[in-house]
Amino acid sequence: MSVFIAISVVDTFSLIDQFEWFMKNVAHLKSLRFYFVGCKIMPWISTQCQICSSCLVLLFTIERFISVRFPLKRAIICTKRRINTAIISIIVIAALATVYELHYIVMVTSPSKIVFTS
């Protein structure tokens, strides 16, 4: 059950790009990407959540495999503590794997438009 909650939270945050588009085009508000912190944080959150989403689906698949292949050992192998530890490990590893984006993404301004480079 906690895997489903983690997947739903991560997928919600991975939809930040669509929310940014909505804020800019529909609500006519200035996008968070036009600020220095938003320029760095928003792509990082989006990338991290995409990685977490894939890994959490893999975790759920492994848990289902164990439930089908070893039905009597499932309660021993897939404890709530192990699942929660795996979820936290996935989030931390994904954050560490994508932390380089916070340093390398820069906002380059030109007279006609703002360009984000990595």
Image: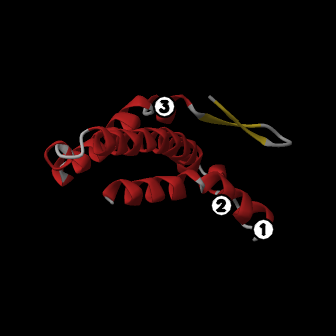
Whole-percent x, y for residue 93 in the image? 34, 34
Residue located beneath label 3 in the image: 103
Q: Quadrant of the C terminus?
A: top right
Q: Residue at x 53, y 49 (%)?
A: 37
Whole-percent x, y for residue 107 in the image? 65, 38
Pointer 1 local density, CA inside 10 Å: few below 14, some 14–19, many at least 20 = few
Residue 38, compared with residue 116, is above or below; it is below
Judging from the image, what secondary structure is the residue with disc 2 in?
A: helix
Residues at marks 1 and 3, CA–CA distance in whole angstroms: 29 Å
Closer to us: 118 or 97: 97
Closer to us: 38 or 22: 22
Identify residue type, mark 2. Answer: Phe
Whole-percent x, y for residue 30 in the image? 71, 61
For this view, does 104 lie left or right of residue 60? right
Identify residue type, mark 1. Answer: His
List the single residue furthest toward the right.
112
Q: Nearer the viewer, mark 2 or mark 1?
A: 2
**Which dot marks residue 84?**
none
| Badge 3 or badge 2: first in the primary sequence | 2
Q: Quadrant of the N terminus?
A: bottom left
Judging from the image, what secondary structure is the residue with disc 1 in?
A: loop
| Badge 2 or badge 1: first in the primary sequence | 2
**Which dot marks residue 19?**
2
Residue 39, compared with residue 20, is above or below; it is above
Q: Do the CB atoms of the residues marked 2 and 1 lie less than 8 Å apart?
A: no
Closer to us: 53 or 109: 53
Residues at marks 2 and 1, CA–CA distance in whole angstroms: 12 Å
